[in-house]
Amino acid sequence: MGSLKKLAGETAIYGMSSIVGRFINWWLVPYHSRIFLPEEYGVVTNLYSYVAFFLVFLTFGMETGFFRYANKSNDKNNKIYSTSAISLFGSSVLFVLLTYLFSGPISGFLDYPNSENFIKWLAIIVALDAATSIPFANLRLEGKAVRFATLKLVNIFFNIFFNIFFLSICPHILKSNPESLIRLIYDPAIGVGYVFISNLIASVITLIMLLPEIRKIKLEFDWGLFREMFWYSFPILLVGIAGMINQNLDKIILPKLIPADQKPMEQLGIYGANYKLAVVMNMFIQAFRYSFEPFFFSHQKSSDSRVIYARVMKYFIIFGLFIFLGITLFIDVFKVIIGPEYHSGLKVIP
């Protein structure tokens, strides 16, 4: 029972950061819907769906592999931590280089022929998130839930701050004084691109704040260990891809399926805004996953591990059902988060 209490306590900490962060991010939906046209918001929804896919590819399940091997050996000399982190740093750098080299063809393939900068910015965001995933995982392994939650909240705070700065404050200053020095950092033509720029700045700040964890990484890479960890993590990669297909493929192919005369990006914008109302369930699952992965591997050798895992599953299902029923039964309350012009898509939520 003590281990279950520890899991519940860490889930609460991760959950509070996730709930507060997602709740704050919720307000970007009505905010963006008042700043951008629906088809512009559709661009944000569409491109971030690609980001989710590439993030899974770049991390290739290494977080779970890191937990398994670190708990197995205690990793006193940081070899597992260093090998895991260096592998993701390397894949992230390679990804950015390839994206920059082929940004033109990529933007054309995605039907954004004049948005090469969007592709480049998003590539850096994906790379930074992938590269910092192991340092974040190490915080979870060491049970530093408060620091982990703080860094996640700081990232969200700066993301929202720069969204407001670039999308509201800068235009207001420029409108009041067209000759203002704000022109040096703000270009109205970028438009929806400032959503990605804000995310990029927040990711860079998070990377800087993670430097104490990054400094623990030694320039030591064990190829044999990496191969073991990679093949152990490979099934997790496949599961992650399947999960991303379930969560995001619809937002990638929807513009391709809707006839041009029915304004596909506008429809995607409406769909994407309503999709985010279901984030309550995602918050619970994410908070649970953050605490359960290290918990699972730390108890795998316990004699009563099966009993503990069975209890965890029971309570997970119970809480999940309560959340599902709450959203479904009180949809009239949740719908106020988005503007009335998006209510036509409420039917997709259940």
Image (cartoon, rainbow, N blue to C red):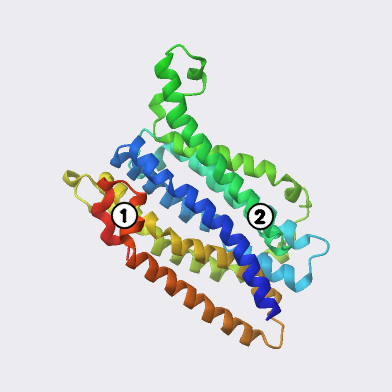
The x and y percentages for residue 207 are: 65, 44
Q: Where, quadrant-wise, is the C terminus in this rendering? A: bottom left
Q: Which residue is mark 2?
A: 148
Q: Which residue reaches farthest left?
A: 261
* Closer to us: 205 or 102: 205
Q: Using the rendered image of the protein, determine whether residue 295 is visible from the camera's viewpoint.
A: yes
Q: Is residue 177 above or below residue 4?
A: above
Q: Secondary structure at mark 2?
A: helix
The image position of residue 58, as x and y in percent, is 55, 55
The structure residue drawn at horizontal position 70% and vertical position 58%, both measured from the top left corner, is 139
- If the image is split into quadrants, where does the N terminus sit? bottom right
Q: Amino acid at mark 2?
A: Phe
Which one is nearer the viewer's eye here, 84 or 47?
47
Circle 1 SS class: helix
- Relative to 315, does residue 278 appear above or below in the rendering? above
The residue lying toward the viewer, choosing from 142 and 71, is 142
Residue at 54% from the left image edge and 71% from the top image edge: 235
Q: Report whether residue 187 is seen.
A: no
Residue 36 location, quadrant:
top left
Q: Which residue is mark 1?
A: 253
- Residue 42 position in % (x across, y down): 33, 45
Asked if residue 213 lies left or right of residue 133, the reply is right
